[in-house]
Amino acid sequence: MRTRRTLAVALCAVALTATAACGKDGSPGAAGAAASGSNAPTLPTYTVKTDVKIDSAILAEAKKRGQLIIGAKADQPFLGFEDVASGDRSGFDIEIAKMIAADLGFTPQQIKWQTLVSSQREPAIAKGQIDFYVGTYSINDERKKSVSFAGPYYIAGQDFLVKNDNTSITGPESVTGKNICTATGSTSIKNIQQYNAKVTQFDTYSACVEKLMAGEVDAVTTDDAILKGYASKFAGKLKVVGKPFTKENYGVGLNKDDAALRGAISDALKAHEDNGDWKKAYDATLGLSGSAAPTPPALDRY
Amino acid sequence: MGFLFEDDNFSLFRDGFLQTIELSALSALLALLLGTLLAAFRVSPVPVLRAFGTAWVTLFRNTPLTLLFFAVEFGLPPLGVHFSHLVFGVLALGGYTASFVCEVIRSGINTVPLGQAEAARSLGMTFGQTLTLVVLPQAARTVLAPLSSVFIALPRNSAIAGAFSVGELYSVQQTFSERGYAIFAIFFWVACAYLVISAAVATLFRVLESRLAVAR
């Protein structure tokens, strides 16, 4: 009898500790909903074009199917994010994809999103599993061998995400001996190691951000677009330093041989950059971080 | 295949390999000591200790290892516990494996006839003496084979630590993937490395088995 009671007490204690620990770990998003104020910038709406005539095989196929399949990321808040509960996509890259889709004659309801991580991008595009891809996709010569790029629509660079009250980290020269967090195996590590920073690596940036909020690392480093997304999510708590020290041209990835579609996407980007949609989309997503909108980069048509 | 010998790739790979061995060895040591202690707890006459042993096994054996790493890496620092990432990894992996070691050793203890313990007690041995001098030595022999399985699984489980800032083989694989080498070549070398470790552990246990075997 006594044994049973002791056992029951011990199990209760264990159960209580377990739930307490869960509460601590489980809800990092609780503080994240602070971004919407009364005069918060709103997302633009895009007029869907009706008489689109583009001589593109991929687009013809999409028309027949009645759906445009767009590849995107799903784990980057305010950049390329999927709310798992509702299935809603949001973020700057998502807006870019929507404005392109509108100019190609597709409503947001006609877009079928497909989440692809970085390593799956080229194969998916080459095999025609997606019509095009918008998601922190850096244009480089290696990738141009298997896909082609419209854009660039944004110029990113490696930067630092720090706590709002941090004044000691001002750029790459100031991180010597500091504890810097980034994703396991990413190219950001090499760039930062030459400044003699102490590097901590986690599988996801959200884990790094968690450590930053807890004060266990001094900064998170990767492309500033991704960092601005987190700074928007935790507006008022985190900020991006704003001294990018690398240059990544984000483009829209698509089939290597469909020059017509590439031209049409570039036209769409140009049109929405000129009519102010680009800036509105930025202000309502990454702009919430407090970083002002840059001027859209010049398109590279080829 | 040849990419391993280009640039500084080999030194990166070697560092990852050594880190996997270090992490696995430390975790194995912790698991063995803690597991034996837990097994002793689970057969002890003290109810609180028995309950502790049972609770540990129930909790750690039934929780996904990734979750344990999360709990240790993100749960302990807010409580004021600060260690290096390697130590956190050893705690998670060692604590997890200890629950398996405990059950294996307990099954071994159950194979020792009750008369052995009774005889030891009637000679005036304490519980501790009975366990360490009579029961455990006999139990250890019978559980070598299942123990080797547990300790071969351990280095492979250690790959999870790569996602938690321990620079072992998994994170080396991530780095190589990011640098754009062929996935097949990367996994070939990583698999080779794990094979070497597993084979070494298996050999060690085979030697132990033949050394400790008794004619019955």
Image (spheres, coloured by chain):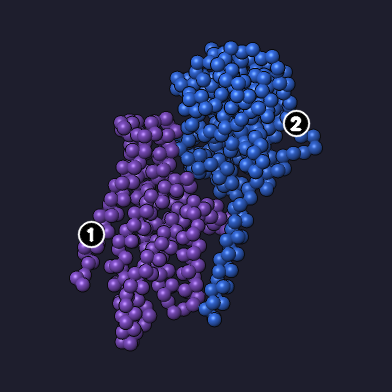
Chain colours: A blue, B purple
Camera-side residue: B192 or B90? B192
Residue denoted by label 1: B207
Q: Classify B67 as above or below A163.
A: below
Mark 2 → mark 1, Cα distance in angstroms: 71 Å
Which chain is indicated by disc 2?
A: A
Q: Classify A113 as above or below B136.
A: above
Give SS at disc 1. helix
Residue B195, position in %: x, y? 31, 46
How crowded is the residue under tag 2: few (<14 C-alpha within 10 Å), some, or many (20+)?
few
Give SS at disc 2. loop
Q: Tag count in the figure?
A: 2
Camera-side residue: A287 or B41? B41
Quadrant in the picture for residue B38: bottom left
How crowded is the residue under tag 1: few (<14 C-alpha within 10 Å), some, or many (20+)?
few
A217 on left or right of A283? left
Camera-side residue: A282 or A83? A83
